[in-house]
């Protein structure tokens, strides 16, 4: 009995992911499923420093590059996830992502939007809008429906007409 109970506790507290060299970002790391993960599972919290919009405006780091680790929480606050203890910052973008960012109040987390097999890389849609700088951020996800750049699903048709919304849905 006690053994079973301990195993259950262990399962509950065990991380669903591990950090390893990424197949998408060849120079970096990524998060990988440590076991099969069901759609809808909360995999990891997205943590960081909660900063005011004013601080965001005043921080040069957010000026030039796309704010990859910056999340809008509400009218007043942003989350700066570029901190070492935020494992979720290592999640790479994919054009056929298996996870999404979710949140409420000042909390953010990453949730599975598909069933994920053990050993698969955990990916999300960075949600970048389409703008003149899109070529600065090539996508190397190699998925069948990769549009070649890190641009949010709704805007990929702007880059390549074949990525219409209907096509995307069928590829999911
Ligand atoms: Zn891609």
Image (tube, rainbow, N blue to C red):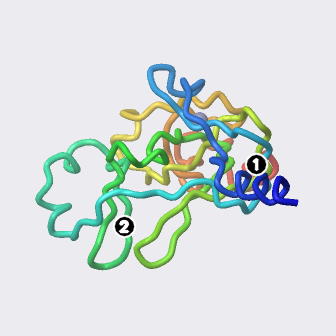
Q: Which residue is mark 2?
A: 72
Q: Under tag 1, what secondary structure? A: helix
Q: Residues within 10 Å of mark 1 (few under 14, many from 20)?
A: few
> Residue 75, percent across and down?
31, 79
- Observer-nearest residue: 13 or 52? 13
| Farthest top residue in view | 26
Residue 167, label in figure: 1
- Identify the residue at horizontal 45%, vertical 20% (top origin): 27
Q: Residue at x 65, y 27 (%)?
A: 142
Left or right of 12? Residue 5 is: right
Disc nearest the viewer among 2 and 1: 2
Q: Is residue 171 left or right of residue 132?
A: right
Rendered residue at 38%/71% (across/down): 73
Q: Position of residue 82 (x, y in %)?
A: 32, 47
Under 8 Å from ligand 1: the CB of mark 1?
no
> In this view of the protein, which residue sits in the foreground, 5 or 56?
5
**Which mark is drawn over residue 80?**
none
Vertical order, 12 against 52 (above or below) = above
> Foreground residue, 84 or 124?
84
Left or right: 84, with 14 as reference point: left
Quadrant of residue 59 in the image? bottom left
Q: Evaluate whether residue 147 shows in this view.
A: no
Please report the residue visible at 72 percent of the width from the left and 58 percent of the height from the top: 9
Q: Could you say where residue 11 lies in the image, as x and y percent from the top left?
A: 74, 52
Q: Secondary structure at mark 2?
A: strand
Q: Reading the chain from its start, which is encountered first: label 2 or label 1?
A: 2
């Amino acid at each position: 009995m006690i053994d079973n109970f301990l195993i259950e506790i262990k399962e509950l507290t065990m991380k669903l992911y591990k950090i390893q060299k990424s197949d998408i970002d060849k120079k970096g790391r990524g998060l990988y499923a440590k076991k099969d993960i069901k759609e809808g599972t909360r995999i990891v919290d997205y943590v960081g420093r909660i900063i005011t919009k004013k601080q965001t405006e005043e921080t040069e780091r957010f000026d030039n590059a796309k704010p990859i680790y910056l999340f809008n929480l509400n009218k007043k606050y942003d989350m700066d996830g570029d901190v070492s203890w935020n494992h979720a910052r290592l999640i790479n973008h994919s054009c056929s992502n298996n996870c999404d960012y979710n949140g409420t109040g000042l909390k953010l987390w990453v949730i599975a939007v598909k069933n994920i097999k053990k050993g698969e890389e955990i990916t999300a849609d960075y949600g970048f809008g389409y703008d003149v700088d899109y070529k600065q951020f090539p996508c190397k996800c190699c998925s069948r429906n990769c549009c070649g750049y890190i641009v949010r699903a709704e805007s990929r048709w702007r880059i390549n007409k074949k990525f219409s919304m209907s096509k995307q849905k069928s590829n999911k």
